Image (cartoon, helix red, strand yellow):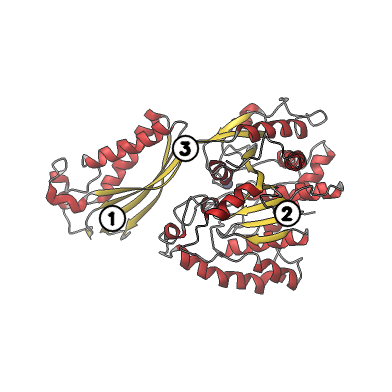
Amino acid sequence: MHLPSFWTTQDLSMNDERNLRIAQMLGDLFWSIDDIGHTPGKDHYHPTPYNRLAWTDQEAWLRTWFAAQMNRRGFKVSVDEAGNQWAWIGGVPTPQNRGISLGSHMDSVPDGGAFDGPLGVLSAIVAFDLLSEEGWKPECPLGIANFHDEEGGRFAIACFGSRMKMGLLTWEQAISMRDRQGLNYAQALQKFKSKLGSVKRMASHSRALGTFSDQEITDAINKSAAPEPHLDDYDADRLIAFKQSIFSHTELHIEQGCDQRNLNAPIAVAEGIWPHGRWCIVMHGEANHAGTTPMMERRNPMIAFAKLVLDVQDISKRRKVRATIGKVIVQPNGVNVIPSRITAWIDCRGQLERDVKGLMQEVRDLAKSGEFDAYPIAVHGEPDAGDLPYDCDITQESWTRSTTFPDAIRQSLVNSVAASVYGSGNRKNVRHVIPPTISSAAGHDAAILAEAGVQAGMIFVRNFSGASHTPIEFATPEDCAYGVRAYMGIIKDFSKRCIRGDNGMGAAR
Ligand SMILES: [Zn+2]
C-alpha cells in the first residue's frame, strides 16, 4: 500500500475497518498520480502545488493513466468530440438503453491542490472496484467521465469540455482563445500529439504507468488523443441522443468552502451553483521611459488599474458578491518602462444574478466616466474625444446563469447518501440523519450538464481547510471513504431506477 504525499499514516487512524480499506484503495490511486505536475515538497505539513493544465505534458499523463486504468477494468474508453474521456461498462448507453454516469475532471488551476477534480474520478473507480468485489454487475451502462479542461486554467473559459459537449461553446469560439504563450486552442491540440508520444517513451519507468504493459500503454494513448477541431461540427441530433442516453450524471467534488466543516457533515448534496461571469478589461496607455518621462506627462494605465482593483473591491462588498482580479498581463512588463497596456480579468459570482451583473454595470459606468483612462494626470477628469486611444475596453468572456440542480436527482441523492453514509452503522462522527444541501460558489461540469437538461447532480466531500484552488485544500481519508460509499449507493440505487425507467428522474428536457 502507498500513501500520497498529502496523507500520513496518522490520517489513516480510524475505527471503521471498511472506511480504512476504502481510504487505502483511494490512497493507492492518488499515490500513482501524485508526482504528475506536482512540485516536490519537504513534508506533509508544507503542501506544494499541482500544475495540470489543459493539453500539457501533465494532462497527457493523466489522460493516459485514466484510459489505462479503465481499460484494465474492462471499461470501453472513448474520447468524445469535445475532448472528454468516457469509460463505459455494461454497454455504451443509447436513448433506448440509458446509462448512469459519474465523474469529474483531472486538470487543475495553476498551483492547485490534489483533490479538486481527481477526487471525483478516483472515487468512482474505487466505488466500482468495491462493488465488483461484492459480485455486483452493472444492470445498465455505467460510465465514468474525465471532463476535459474544467478549470479553464490555460485558456479563458472554464468547463470547456462540458460546455462544448452540450453545444454551449463552438470550435470557432474555442480556437480564437489564446494561452499566455499566445498559442491558440488548435495549436495546443496539435502539440498534444507529441506530448502523448513522450508519455509512451517514458511510461515504463513512471510511477503512474509503470505497472502497465507496452500494449496497454499503446491502447491507453489511443484513447487519450485530443479531438480535431471541426468548425462545422455542431450536430443537434447527436446532442439530443446524448442527453437521452444519460439517465443521471453525478459528480463528486471536494467542497470549496467551509459549510460542511461548520455543519460537521462529511458529505453534502449540492443545491445549486451561483451565477458566475468572467470579464476581460484592457486599459490602454503609452509606453515611455521610466526616467525621462515627467510624472505629469505619463499616460500610465497602471494607475487606472490600481483604481479598478479598489473600485471592484468596494462594489463587491456593497453588493455582497465575490469579485476577484487574479490575472493581469502588463505590457511591455519592463522594470524601467511605463506600461503601454494592462489586461486584467474580473471573475465575479454571487447568490443573486442581479448583483453580479450589477457590479459589472457599475464598472462599465465608471469606465464610461473616464475612471480607468490613462490620461496624463494633469488633465485627468477632463477627458475629451482626442484622448480616446487611452481608454479601456471591457468584454464579457463567459457567463453562467445560476443553476439549481433538478429536484428529482437532488432528492434522490439526498436519499441515497442518507442510506449509504448517514445510515445506521455509519454514524460515527456524523451528527445528521440526512446530508445537508449546500450551494456552491464554484462552477462545475455537472452544472453545465444540468443547465442543458441532463439529470445531473453533485455531492461534496468536506474540505477541512475550507480553501480551494490552492495546495492547502484538504479532505481526510475517512471523509473521502464516505464519498466512495456515497458513490456506491448512488450506483446501486440509480441503476435500479434506470432499469425501471423511474419517471421521477432521468427524463431529458
Ligand atoms: Zn473542480
Disc number lying in front (3 or 2): 3
Which circle marks residue 341 in the picture? 1
Query: Going from the N terminus, do you reach mark 2 or mark 1 first?
Result: 2
Secondary element at image label 3: loop
Left or right of 104? Residue 163 is left
- Identified at 66% across, 36% down, the residue is 505
- Residue highlighted by disc 3: 275
Against 315, residue 286 (above or below) is below
Q: x and y percent of residue 442 in the render?
A: 52, 40
Secondary element at image label 1: strand
Residue closer to the observer: 179 or 351: 351
Query: Going from the N terminus, do you reach mark 3 or mark 2 first?
Result: 2
Marks 2/1: CA–CA distance: 45 Å
Crowd rating for badge 1 (residues with CA inside 10 Å; few <14, some 14–19, many 20+): many
Marks 3/1: CA–CA distance: 30 Å
Label 3 sits on what residue type?
Pro
- Identified at 81% across, 28% down, the residue is 424
- Residue highlighted by disc 2: 29
Disc number lying in front (3 or 1): 3
Res. 113 in view: yes
Asked if marks 3 and 1 touch (Cβ < 8 Å), the reply is no
Residue closer to the observer: 485 or 223: 223
Q: x and y percent of residue 67 in the render?
A: 69, 61
